[in-house]
Image: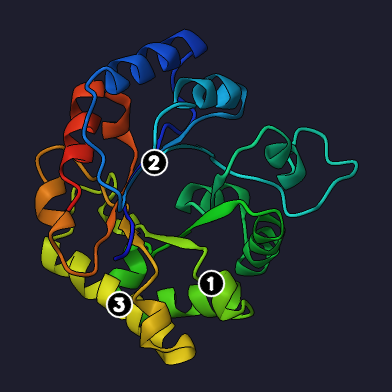
Amino acid sequence: MRKQIAAANWKMNLTYQQGQELLDKILAENIEIKVHHEVIFGVPFPYLIMAKEKVANLKNYHISAQNCYNKKSGAYTGEVSVEMLESIKIHHCIIGHSERREYFAESNLMLSEKLDLLLGTGITPIFCCGEPLSIREAGTQNEFVEKQLQESLFHLSEEDLKKVVIAYEPIWAIGTGKTATTEQAQEIHAHLRSVLAKKYGEDVANEISILYGGSVKANNAKELFSCPDVDGGLVGGASLDAVDFAEIIKALQ
C-alpha cells in the first residue's frame, strides 16, 4: 500500500518560539497514525534540530528541509548542502517548489542534480511539479508536467525512483481566486502516474506517493485524499494552524 502523507511546508514563517508552540499543539493531539501514514514537517533551516527533537520518539513523524543546494560543497555562501542535512539526520527534503522555480529560477536540470545528491545520501526527496495559470488556460498542463518529470526524474533507476515522493502544485489555483476541483486534482494525478508507468511500468508507478499541493485545508482534505491517485497533501498556510493541520492529518485515508 502506498504511503499516505500529510506534509507541512511552513515556508518562511514563524519565529523559533512560535514553531515550538505549533509543534507542541499538534503533537498534543496524539493522533493515531496508521502504519501506512506519515506526517512530515517542512521547517526553516534554523528549526530543523529543534523540530527533530520534538518528534524523535514518535513513529512515522518526520522532519524535512525546505530546500538544499545542487552542489556537494564549496564556496556557496548562504547555501545548505545535502551533506549538512545528512549530518543532523534529516531524512526528507522538499525540492522544486513553485516558489523556488519562480523566484530563484531553479531549472529541471538543477533539480535532477539535487535529486542525485539527496538519493546518494539516503534522504527522501519531495519533488514538486505543476503548471502556472497560463499553461492551464492553454490546456497544455499534461505536457508541461510531463516535461518536468522527464527532465528531472527520468535518469533515475527504478529503485531510486521508488524512493521519491512527488507533490503536484496547481500554481494557477494558489492566490488567484480560482479553485481546483477534486476532479481536476484526480485527473492530473492520474496523468502523472501514467507518465511514470510509461517509463517505469505500472508496478513501479503504483508504489509512488503523489501529494496534492493546491491550497489543502481542513474542510477539503478528506474529499481530496479520497481520490484514488491523491496520496495526501503538501500543505502551506493551513499547516501553520494547529487545529487545521491536525484535521488534515486525520483526513489521511
Query: Could you give the CA–CA distance between mark 2 and mark 3, rounded to whole angstroms?
Result: 40 Å
Element at label 3 = helix
Which numbered circle lies on residue 60? 2
The three-letter amino acid code for the residue at tag 2 is Asn
Which numbered circle lies on residue 138? 3
Element at label 1 = helix
Q: Nearer the viewer, residue 250 or 193?
A: 250
The reply to whether discs 2 and 3 touch (Cβ–Cβ < 8 Å) is no
Query: Residue drawn at (12%, 68%), measured in percent from left and top?
Result: 183
Question: How many marks do you count on the picture?
Answer: 3
Q: Quadrant location of residue 239?
A: top left
Q: Position of residue 85 (x, y in %)?
A: 68, 39
Query: Could you give the CA–CA distance between mark 1 and mark 2, rounded to whole angstroms?
Result: 21 Å
The residue that mark 1 highlights is: 161
- Mark 1 and mark 3 lie on one chain; the one further toward the N terminus is 3
Vertically, is 250 above or below 107?
above
Residue 195 visible from this viewpoint:
no
Element at label 2 = loop
Query: Residue drawn at (60%, 68%), measured in percent from left and top?
Result: 108
The reply to whether discs 1 and 3 touch (Cβ–Cβ < 8 Å) is no
The three-letter amino acid code for the residue at tag 3 is Ala
Query: Residue drawn at (29%, 66%), measured in percent from left and top?
Result: 1
Query: Could you give the CA–CA distance between mark 1 and mark 3, rounded to whole angstroms?
Result: 30 Å
Q: Quadrant location of residue 33?
A: top left
- Mark 1 and mark 2 lie on one chain; the one further toward the N terminus is 2
Residue 69 visible from this viewpoint:
yes
Judged from this view, the residue extending furthest toward the right is 75
Q: Is residue 45 left or right of residue 120?
A: left
